[in-house]
Image (cartoon, rainbow, N blue to C red):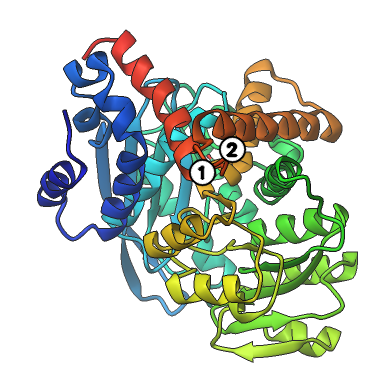
């Protein structure tokens, strides 16, 4: 029998100074502890110890030359967390906040998320502390080449398939793929998020944001509610936020905020036109990491150095980075009458914020369920690459929709509590865990 605090104390001792990894593992273990303690097979197979230890971790030096001719050194990583149900799969993050602990938390989360998609993908994550902000196109290219020169040793279309994450979009995937191909001389599905002309899947750029809104739509339905007229706060302005803003608007909601490191935009008219969505794309590709120009362009309000959670809304979707919504933010949202909070970033809420929302019985969707649409379409990209074929946008979108519906159903099946409240955190963790754990046991230690 396991005790959560004792287990976590041991895990923390083994993984010092990795607070995000400890936060992510604690959340999962709290959710699954009863399932493990009441199943002698899980106990006998030491499943908790095995599932919290990554299969392997690679770190490597990334040397590159900046536009001033100065040599720069960054650290690259790939964490292959668990491949019980399929090849390692998960994004690459280029962001100055990246540490080993960050990527371990993300790889751990990815394992359960990928399991929820119903597709055969294991969990992994990688990236670098490289900061793309303000870097020129040539600098990004040189960095990507150097990064892939090392990474290519550890990946392959049947073993480990990276994709994008924060700081890694279509351009970076292109540069990375080009370098992989230069070395291996083969066109395979070794990365996902590729360009449409060279093996990418339709709908992949929008998939995370669209998927979140398909998931949210199921949450609304389960509460006899709809998107019609809902006021929505979204944080971030990158690829994920862009898809989320677009789909929420199309489903009848009014998205009133987006944000960047410089502050947030409040647009009372709704971020609801193609022109506004296109402008978001332009902001993103500028490499400046600011949203302020949106305000002048569309007559909206810019609030410097604040997060959008102070705005009264019905639904809040953190779409930027981990722990971007804290306890005080959650309290402000609840005080302002928020009805639903759905993470689109991975672990977008702090543990305290998530617990508070659950305690207040606000339906709360965790990232590993709500944002699984991105990696799900990556899985569909792998299928298309294997078949040397491509599906239409309608076909991919329909499959994505179906997957998000199934994820919601799995959360409800495992997460319904005695008072009728659907605890999506618990549901997602139990459903994701069981499949991985059972597969590990089937395959022996
Ligand atoms: O967090 C995520 O699920 C991603 N960054 C997408 C990973 C993928 O392999 O598409």
Give the structural element (helix, strand or loop) at label 1: loop
Local secondary structure at mark 2: loop
For the C terminus, the quadrant is: top left
Q: Residue at x 27, y 50 (%)?
A: 60
| Position above or below: 144 against 70 | above
157 with respect to 105 (left or right): right
Q: Residue at x 72, y 61 (%)?
A: 242
Marks 1, 2: nearer the viewer? 1
Residue 122 can be seen, yes or no: no
**Number of on-image labels:** 2
Left or right: 159 in relation to 57 = right
Left or right of 242, for residue 128: left
Image quarter where the N terminus lies is top left
- What label sits on residue 335 in the rendered view? none
Residue 423 is marked as 1
Residue 321 seen in this snapshot:
yes
- Cβ(mark 2) to ligand 1 < 8 Å? yes
Q: Which residue is mark 2?
A: 192
Seen in the picture, residue 100 relative to 263 is either above or below; the reply is: above
Q: Position of residue 27 (x, y in %)?
A: 35, 47
Q: Position of residue 104 (x, y in %)?
A: 31, 47
The Cα–Cα distance between marks 1 and 2, rounded to whole angstroms, is 32 Å
Residue 15: x and y in percent read 16, 50
Q: Earlier in the sequence, mark 1 or mark 2?
A: 2
Instruction: Characterize the local packing of mark 1: few (<14), some (14-19) or many (20 or more) Cα atoms within 10 angstroms.
Output: many
Of 95 and 331, nearer the camera is 331
Q: Where 177 falls versus 143 (above or below)?
A: above
Point 64% across, 76% down: residue = 336
Residue 338: x %, y % from top left: 65, 67
Instruction: Please tell me how crowded label 2 is: few (under 14), some (14-19), or many (20+) other residues with Cα within 10 Å.
Output: many
């Amino acid at each position: 029998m396991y005790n959560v605090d004792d287990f976590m104390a041991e895990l923390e001792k083994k993984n010092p100074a990795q607070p995000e990894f400890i936060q992510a593992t604690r959340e999962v273990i709290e959710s699954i502890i009863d399932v493990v303690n009441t199943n002698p097979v899980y106990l006998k197979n030491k499943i908790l110890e095995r599932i919290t230890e990554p299969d392997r971790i690679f770190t490597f030096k990334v040397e590159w030359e900046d536009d001033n001719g100065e040599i720069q050194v960054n650290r690259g990583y790939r964490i292959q967390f668990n491949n019980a149900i399929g090849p390692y799969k998960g994004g690459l993050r280029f962001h100055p906040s990246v540490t080993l602990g960050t990527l371990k938390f993300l790889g751990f989360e990815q394992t359960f998320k990928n399991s929820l998609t119903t597709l055969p993908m294991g969990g992994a994550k990688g990236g670098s502390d490289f900061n793309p902000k303000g870097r020129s196109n040539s600098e990004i290219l040189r960095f990507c080449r150097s990064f892939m020169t090392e990474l290519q040793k550890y990946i392959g279309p049947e073993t480990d398939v990276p994709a994008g994450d924060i700081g890694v979009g279509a351009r970076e995937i292109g540069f990375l793929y080009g370098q992989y191909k230069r070395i291996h001389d083969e066109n395979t599905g070794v990365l996902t998020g590729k360009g449409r002309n060279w093996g990418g899947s339709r709908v992949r750029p929008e998939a995370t944001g669209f998927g979140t809104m398909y998931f949210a739509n199921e949450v609304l339905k389960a509460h006899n509610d709809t998107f019609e007229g809902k006021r929505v706060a979204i944080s971030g302005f990158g690829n994920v936020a862009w898809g989320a803003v677009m789909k929420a608007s199309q489903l009848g909601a009014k998205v009133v905020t987006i944000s960047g490191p410089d502050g947030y935009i409040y647009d009372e008219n709704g971020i609801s036109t193609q022109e506004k969505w296109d402008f978001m794309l332009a902001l993103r590709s500028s490499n400046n990491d600011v949203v302020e120009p949106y305000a002048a362009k569309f007559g909206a309000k810019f609030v410097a150095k604040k997060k959008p959670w102070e705005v009264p809304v019905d639904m809040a979707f953190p779409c930027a980075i981990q722990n971007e919504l804290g306890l005080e933010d959650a309290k402000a949202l609840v005080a302002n009458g928020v009805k639903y909070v759905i993470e689109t970033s991975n672990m977008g809420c702090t543990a305290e914020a998530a617990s508070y929302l659950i305690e207040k019985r606000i339906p709360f969707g965790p990232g590993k369920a709500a944002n699984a649409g991105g990696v799900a379409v990556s899985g569909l990209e792998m299928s298309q690459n294997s078949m040397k074929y491509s599906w239409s946008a309608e076909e991919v979108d329909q499959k994505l929709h179906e997957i998000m519906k199934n994820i919601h159903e799995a959360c409800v099946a495992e997460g319904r509590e005695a008072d009728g409240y659907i605890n999506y955190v618990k549901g997602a963790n139990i459903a994701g865990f069981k499949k991985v754990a059972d597969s590990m046991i089937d395959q022996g230690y």
